[in-house]
Amino acid sequence: MTATEISVEDQQAYAQMAARLSDLDAQIEQLKEQRDQVAELLLGCLPEGAKKVEAGDYTISVRAGARRLNTRKIEEQFPAAQYPTMYQQKAVLITEEVKRQVSEAFLEANGLFIVGRPSVSVK
């Protein structure tokens, strides 16, 4: 990808915006880390088993972590060949085959593409 030709003034303006975006990303990351640290500290300080604690103007709620089946381990211990009733067979569209068998013009004309939101990255 080649850079688009732009004026020096525009380059300076874009550089300032890119720097600001980069600074904001760094601040957000730093704030997320601080938030996680404070939440972990708070969790360690609360009485064991507490679900709700009143603290001044705040109500602190503690939720247990989600409990899910470890499907990778279950699949190892209960393989589909031996336990077919634990598994479902379902059709999965192979997009590479669609692209190979159907013309791009047809896909485009019939609205079969989804275009995501443009994004900006600063490196």
Image (cartoon, helix red, strand yellow):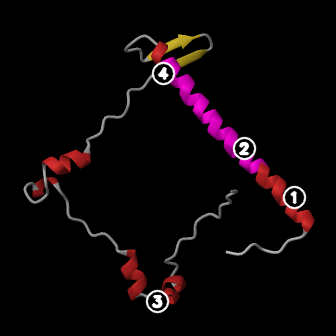
The CA distance from mark 3 to mark 2 is 43 Å
The CA distance from mark 4 to mark 2 is 29 Å
Amino acid beneath label 3? Ser
Residue 24, numbered circle: 2
Q: Which residue is mark 3?
A: 103
Q: Is most of the magenta stretch helix, strand or loop? A: helix
C-beta proximity under 8 Å, tags 3 and 1: no
- Front tag of 3 and 1: 1
Name the disc covering residue 47, or none: none
Q: Earlier in the sequence, mark 3 or mark 2?
A: 2
Left or right of 108: which side holds 102?
Answer: left
9 vs 105, nearest the viewer: 9
Kindly identify which residue carries mark 1.
13
At label 4, the amino acid type is Ser
**Residue 12: x percent and y percent?**
88, 59
Q: Residues within 10 Å of mark 3 (few under 14, many from 20)?
A: few
- Most foreground residue, 82 or 11: 11
> Residue at the location (42% across, 87% down)?
102
Report the residue at 39% width, 78% height from top.
96
Q: Quadrant of the C terminus?
A: bottom right
Secondary-structure class at tag 3: loop
Residue 61 got which mark?
4
Q: Dot 4 lies on which element?
A: strand
Magenta residues span 20-43
Q: Is residue 46 left or right of residue 91?
A: right
Q: Quadrant of the N terminus?
A: bottom right
